[in-house]
Amino acid sequence: MKSKFYFFIAVFIFHINVCSQNLNPFHPGEWFKYKITYSGVFKAGEATVELTDGVVNNKMVFHAKMNARSTGPINFFFKVKDRYESYFTPEEIIPLKFIRDIDEGGYTKNLNILFDDNKSTATVIDFKKNKRMNFSTNTNAQDMVSVFYFLRRFFKMEDLNENNEISVNMFFDSENYVLKVKYLTSEFINTTFGKIYCYKIQPYVQSGRVFKKDESLTMWITADKNRVPIKMKADLLVGSVKIDLEAFSSLTYPFEVQFD
């Protein structure tokens, strides 16, 4: 038996094979809620992602918001409250403004990054240190939120290289780097909503402060036009984290959920 659900996607959304019409598989109004579990034992937090309309420099843009917070017992020894926001152009997916305001167990940052793609520059405003710094950026540099929409909008399966990887230019905090994402396989996974066919991918992360190794993060995204991130797993320096889609609102395209 099969049933159709209508979802909408915000962030942590990843695209590998964009639709042939080359239309955006996202639009303002999308919302998701995720449950975060630590070491498979207890609920450690929750995260929401949302896409709305916005205005930057008198331009109509998309405004993506990601909020995450710790819940329950973990708050006693590692309280987390993170906010990430990105303002980007609807068609080209060019970031204009990025906000990072985080508190992770006492480790805090409060940054705004203003992008000028025409000049290939980024102005970083550090409110905590009361500093304003200018940096050169690479072509089509994405922030850590806009990159998911960029990949969803433009990359196709045939863009994978001989190692089954794709790459995109990024700018984060004060430096340029190249994000690499590896396609692993396609498979059905069991979810709260039923059995869903997904792409299993592996974004390479930086090992050290949080992650155990560069290959610590694994994601499952729906193998349809929406590319909904259904599930994520990460091996940390201490323990592991699992993230599962818990609630949602309105998806651009329907996709099939299979029930046994």
Image: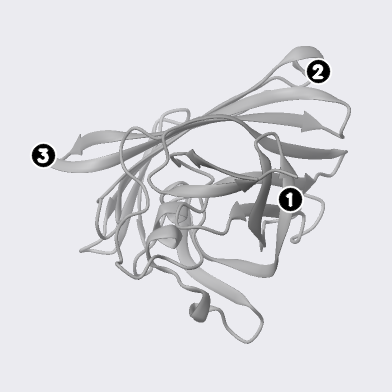
> Which comes sooner in the sequence, label 3 or label 2?
3
Q: Can residue 103 be seen here?
A: no
Task: Say which element carries label 2.
Answer: loop
Earlier residue among tags 2 and 1: 2
Packing grade of label 3 (10 A; few <14, some 14-19, many >=20) is few
The disc placed on residue 8 is none
Question: What numbered label is drawn on residue 58?
Answer: 3
Q: Considering only vertical position in the picture, is 235 above or below 6?
A: below
Q: Secondary structure at mark 1?
A: strand
Displayed quadrant of residue 199: bottom right
The residue to which callout 1 is attached is: 189
Is residue 110 positioned above or below 140 on the image? above
Q: How is the image coloured?
A: one colour
Q: Residue 77's mark?
A: 2
Res 182 → quadrant = bottom right
* Relative to 148, residue 101 above or below: above
Closest to the camera, between mark 2 and mark 1, is 1
Which of the two labelled residues, at mark 3 and mark 1, occupies the earlier sequence position?
3
Amino acid type shown at disc 3: Asn
Packing grade of label 2 (10 A; few <14, some 14-19, many >=20) is: few
Residue 49 place in picture, x, y as percent: 48, 33
